[in-house]
């Protein structure tokens, strides 16, 4: 019998959860298909977020000319056969699973077919395509990031599946346990649901579900406080300079054994909450996290405790976090901003367009325009006084401004 996750795989975009920006009524992929203008694309996101389902639904619109290729298991000869099929179809679609595993030579083989528009590829990957995929391939594709599936979405899907598949009614405590234990992975959640639904009606208890699934509960304490609430409390304690509370919440998280999640949260805190208040803390926390992952539990608690205390007792500054978010917001509101011509320095000694090399001037500084015209005098980064390093930055920048007047 086919697994539950396979049986209920979405056949239409309306059945996809959490990806309305791509396949909702106003989603970009929906518009492509409605207008019969499909372009090569790369879908990337966490496992079990719906990448394969979306690709298969797209391919179903072109049943005679769509092919699949797995970069982990298929060879280049299969790809050549697919490319040759472009002689017979106006639109040939190739869904490439794990495209990040495709070697450079194989990726280069696709270029002329993609360039001519004869072959449309839909690449699927869990890796960041800006780091893992050949830039030549990437530049010929639209890159779309998939949303991480929320816990609420998974709860909704489980309830919908129970009703559709006529599975035994399951208590909300078990459903929440499955959702939190799934790691935001739809496939994992459905696999867990399928196993739990094998229990007899009088056996459907949270305790039995936990034993059957074989995962540590993310519902960490007796009140049912969940995994992500604990993680949030840990980060807020770091931000609030309370090392004792931060250690307490990390101790709870360590009971789950999910070291990678803890390390990601600590690294994020290092650059969001501490930042230039203590610029050396980022590399130190990274080293502590690497040590923790290498050691594994129970020893991993030692470098992670070091990182927690280091973060919580550091001067705090979110200045760089605020600065980049302001810059990104401007990109959403303003378009077609040209780089000042003198910065491009394409015409040497061209009068007013000549780039001034700062190292040729006193203190390595000369006043000139760097921002586009639309953003002149815009300030994104504002130094804070919480740490000696950033105070020095503030003093240095103020000195430069006075000398430039």
Image: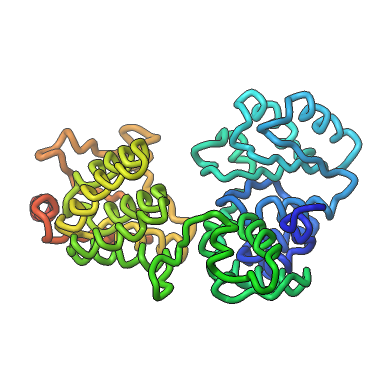
Residue drawn at the location 52% of the way across and 57% of the way down: 183
Tell how many labels: 0
Who's the residue at 85% across and 50% down the image?
62
- Displayed quadrant of residue 303: top left
Where residue 315 sits in the image (x, y, percent)?
A: 14, 57
Location of residue 88 by image quarter: top right
In the rendered view, would you say 252 is above or below 367?
below
Query: Would residue 310 be visible to someone looking at this image?
Result: yes
The image quadrant of residue 9 is bottom right
Quadrant placement of the C terminus: bottom left
Between 337 and 266, the one lying in front of the other is 266
Question: 341 or 13: which is nearer to us?
Answer: 13
The correct choice, above or below, for 362 with respect to 338 in the image is above
Q: Is residue 119 left or right of residue 219?
A: right
Q: In this view, does 375 lie to the left or right of 390?
A: right
| Residue 176 in picture, x, y percent from top left | 54, 70
Q: Say which residue appears at 72% left-offset and 55% top-offset.
A: 53
Residue 80 is situated, as x and y percent measured from the top left of the image, at 79, 27
Observer able to see residue 377: no
Relative image position of residue 139 (x, y in whole percent): 59, 40
């Amino acid at each position: 019998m086919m697994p539950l996750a396979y049986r209920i795989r979405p056949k239409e975009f309306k059945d996809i959860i959490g990806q309305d920006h791509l396949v909702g009524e106003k989603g970009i992929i929906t518009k492509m298909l409605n207008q019969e203008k499909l372009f090569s694309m790369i879908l990337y996101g966490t496992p079990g977020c719906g990448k394969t389902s979306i690709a298969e639904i797209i391919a179903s619109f072109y049943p005679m000319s769509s092919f699949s290729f797995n970069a982990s298991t298929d060879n280049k000869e299969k790809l050549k056969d697919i490319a040759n099929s472009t002689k017979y179809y106006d639109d040939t679609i190739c869904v490439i699973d794990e495209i990040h595993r495709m070697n450079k030579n194989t990726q280069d083989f696709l270029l002329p077919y993609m360039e001519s528009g004869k072959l449309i590829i839909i690449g699927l990957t869990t890796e960041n395509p800006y780091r893992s995929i050949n830039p030549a391939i990437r530049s010929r594709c639209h890159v779309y990031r998939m949303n991480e599936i929320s816990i609420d979405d998974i709860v909704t899907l489980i309830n919908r599946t129970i009703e559709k598949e006529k599975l035994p009614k399951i208590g909300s405590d078990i459903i929440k346990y499955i959702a939190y234990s799934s790691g935001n992975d739809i496939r994992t959640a459905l696999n867990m649901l399928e196993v739990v639904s094998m229990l007899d009606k009088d056996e459907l208890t949270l305790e039995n579900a936990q034993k059957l699934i074989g995962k540590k509960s993310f519902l960490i304490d007796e009140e049912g406080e969940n995994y992500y609430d604990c993680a949030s409390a840990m980060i807020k304690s770091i931000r609030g300079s309370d090392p004792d509370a931060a250690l307490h919440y990390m101790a709870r998280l360590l009971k789950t054994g999910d070291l990678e999640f803890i390390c990601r949260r600590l690294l994020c805190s290092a650059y969001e909450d501490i930042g230039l208040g203590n610029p050396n803390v980022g590399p130190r926390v990274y080293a502590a996290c690497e040590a923790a992952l290498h050691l594994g539990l129970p020893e991993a608690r030692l470098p992670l405790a070091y990182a927690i205390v280091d973060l919580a007792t550091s001067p705090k500054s979110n200045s760089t976090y605020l600065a980049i978010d302001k810059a990104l917001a401007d990109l959403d509101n303003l378009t077609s901003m040209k780089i000042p011509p003198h910065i491009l320095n394409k015409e040497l000694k061209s009068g007013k367009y000549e780039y001034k090399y700062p190292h040729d001037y006193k203190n390595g500084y000369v006043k000139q325009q760097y921002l586009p015209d639309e953003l002149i005098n815009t300030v994104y980064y504002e130094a804070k006084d919480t740490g000696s390093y950033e105070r020095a930055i503030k003093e240095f920048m103020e000195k430069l401004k006075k000398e430039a007047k």
